[in-house]
Amino acid sequence: MRILYSVLLLLFLIPDWMGQAQLPLLGDDPVFEVHPVSLDEAHPALRRVGQLTWLGGVELIGHTPAFGGFSSMRVTGDHFTLLSDGGNIVSFRMDSRWRLSERGFAELPAGPGTGWGKEDRDSESMTVDPGTGQIWVGFERANAIWRYAPGLVRGEAHAAPPAMAEWPPNGGAESLVRLADGSFIVISETGPGAHDKGRAAIRFASDPTQHPRAGFAFTFLPPAGFDPSDITALPDGRLLVLVRQFRVPFDFSAKLVMVDPATIRPGALVRGREIATLARPLIHDNFEGLAITRENGATIVWICSDDNQLFLQRSLLLKFRLEPDPVSPRPLKRDRPASRGGEAGR
């Protein structure tokens, strides 16, 4: 009995004694604030970047080591839910003047493993059914998808789809979206697709936690040097994919790519059209979260960053208005037919 007491005392006094340190948690005191940021500090009047119009942004500043690492988010009206790649949840309301209220901290109530270490809660993507409020989360390392009750209060179902089994442990389900027809799309961050330089992707016919084999594979081809970090659906059904790039010594850039869902077919190589780039001298960081809302008939694009809990990075939350697609000019009338010799423009 004395030996048992000694072992229990060691476990109590040295919680990391048996291996990996416990994943940092946010705690019960939701204290954080926001500071305004600029699209371009040297040119504060600049508002347009590609097909986006700058509406403002803030840096979220917490006071605990677990704050940050935001990899996905959900925005409903003025209510924000940010999910970190360690299973931590930060929620709040923010009005049109960037003032916070109803701050909250929580942790995913269930997930792969015990939740002790990061590999147990490497939550990288999130999507929601607006009708039921149910939420799906994609996990790297486990290459799994979990479904949660509304508000992320309870785990309901989970699956490790066979088609995701060979995705890299640190490059898996980085992008996840539920479409209006009830199907789902998941894209790996670095997992190779069927084509060189592409990323493995799957379109599930329905809830992947219930039907993990129902669907088909395709390949997403991001811009050269970029990796997909999130995906969302626009009100008209088109898809918006966030891709980012890291360059040594410490430089991030990101692009938004518009994808026509009609191009997503079994075995297809799917490309998109670049609509905006965030890179020096514009505001930039490790952008990983993407969400869409509507305001007064306009489509609003929200982007958040994963600071990796490093002092060299920031937890940014940016707001843009998506402008209409540029209209192609009508071809000029010609007095005579153009020569058909040569096809350099094709």
Image (cartoon, rainbow, N blue to C red):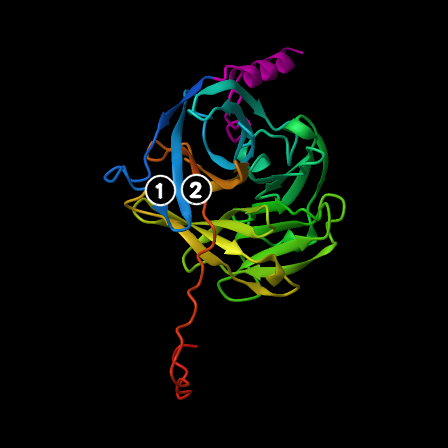
What is the CA distance from the residue labelled 2 to the residue labelled 1? 8 Å
Looking at the image, is 60 positioned above or below residue 199? above
Looking at the image, is 136 positioned above or below residue 169? above
Residue 18: in magenta span: yes
Q: Which picture quadrant has residue 96?
A: top left
- Relative placement, left or right, of 71 versus 151 is left
Which span of residues is magenta-colored?
A: 1-30
Q: Nearer the viewer, residue 336 or 157?
A: 336
- Relative placement, left or right, of 144 versus 46 is right
Residue 336 screen position, x and y as percent: 39, 85
Residue 292 screen position, x and y as percent: 54, 40
Residue 65 screen position, x and y as percent: 43, 24
Residue 109: in magenta span: no
Q: Quadrant of the C terminus?
A: bottom left
- What's under tag 2, amino acid-wise? Phe
Q: Are marks 2 and 1 in contact (CB under 8 Å)?
A: yes
Looking at the image, is 246 positioned above or below residue 12? below
Residue bearing mark 2: 287
- What's under tag 1, amino acid-wise? His
Q: Nearer the viewer, residue 170 or 51?
A: 51
**Secondary structure of the magenta portion, mostly?**
loop
Q: Residue at x 33, y 40 (%)?
A: 283
Residue bearing mark 1: 284
Q: Residue at x 36, y 47 (%)?
A: 49
Residue 13 screen position, x and y as percent: 52, 15
Q: So how many labels did they put on this image?
A: 2
- Relative placement, left or right, of 28 versus 312 is right
Q: Residue at x 52, y 61 (%)?
A: 271
* Residue 298 visible within the image: yes
